[in-house]
Image (tube, rainbow, N blue to C red):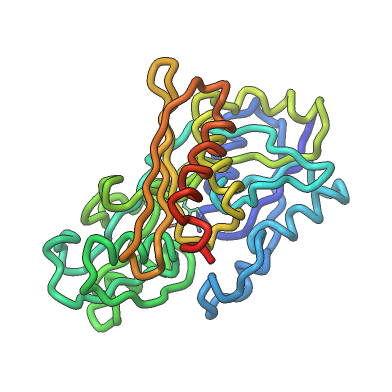
Amino acid sequence: MRLRFGTRGSKLARWQTDHVLSLLPEGSGEIEVIQTKGDRVLDTPLPLIGGKGLFTAELEAALHENRIQCAVHSLKDLPTEQPTGLAIGAILKRAPVGDVLVSRSGKSLLDLPHHATIGTSSRRRAAQLLRARPDLQLLDIRGNVDTRIQKALDPSGPYDAILLAHAGLERLGYSATITEVLPFNVLLPAPGQGAIAVQCRDDAAIIAALAPLHDTATAQAVTAERSFLAALGGGCSLPLAAYAYLEGSTLTLTARVLSLDGTRCIEVTGTASPSDAEALGAQLADDAKAQGATELLG
Ligand SMILES: NCc1[nH]cc(CCC(=O)O)c1CC(=O)O
């Protein structure tokens, strides 16, 4: 079966789509670049543009119309609910999952000067950073990975350091710019971070063609993370983090919900059989709600 794969036009999206095709038999797919609203509106802080699916709506329209059969996404940008007629056909084995600091002075998070300025538009990253270093000044930063790295290393720019996903930097060859890989006790990743997902038309033949791409352990981990997110309202603009991993036959999930200023942090953790990934996420969301998570996210 020959499949048409839709992708956003950013370098990272293109890399991820090329990677997906490289894992399939020669000649089984072709690529179509489709621009999304998230790519067009470049100057507004992401949380203010709002709306789920900022980076996915145009691709989903093309899937519904059968102009493409598959769309490659960063899983963390995909809403937790799939529209009728579409499915997540495959989830690839995860790359590095965490976040990294890129600082122009080369100083690590704890060595940055008092009141240093940090570029991030992610409430999850900002809240956890302030929890570790309440003195830091957070500034918005937009643009794709290349633009952000350029801004971060600009000696006359406003940022002493920025935060980015480890996976994106590694994929685009920017590993050498990483100052520090932040540990999960400081910065827990977004649900699904580091995982590439292939969304497709909900068609058994298409899903079967994508089977060689699928990594079960990654899928079980991200199912728990996204189940936690879904139970707390979904959306990628919440100050919420979740990370799960499989060790032997035990799935462990840790999740956090924070106040925007990082002064309050609810952390929950639990284990389950991987076949109960979804229930584990839901259970921990209940635990977090019992500690006031709904009010924090209010
Ligand atoms: N929100 C943008 C986005 N979506 C996925 C990645 C990185 C790759 C990944 O997490 O799989 C990034 C960039 C970033 O957060 O630094």
User: Is residue 258 left or right of 159 when viewed as pictured?
Assistant: right
Query: Number of labelled discs?
Result: 0
Image quadrant in which the N terminus is located: top right
Say which residue appears at 51% left-offset and 40% top-offset. Answer: 225
Q: Nearer the viewer, residue 204 or 69?
A: 204
Q: Residue furthest right?
A: 65
Residue 210 in the image: x percent, y percent?
A: 68, 28
Q: Quadrant of residue 20?
A: top right
**Foreground: 181 or 134?**
134
Residue at coordinates 63% horizontally, 57% vertically from top-left? 8
Q: Quadrant of residue 277?
A: top right
Above or below, 218 relative to 125: above
Tell me: residue 82, above or below residue 283: below
Q: Which residue is at a point 57% across and 29% down the rendered structure image?
A: 23
The one nearer the camera, 7 or 218, is 218
Task: Answer left or right for 136 relative to 261.
Answer: left
Quadrant into which the C terminus falls: bottom right
Tell me where residue 138 sits by quadrant: bottom left
Q: Residue furthest top?
A: 248
Q: Position of residue 96 (x, y in %)?
A: 37, 40
Residue depicted at x 36% and y 77%: 139
Q: Position of residue 243 (x, y in %)?
A: 42, 40
Q: Residue 92 in the image: x percent, y percent?
A: 54, 33
Q: Residue furthest front?
A: 290
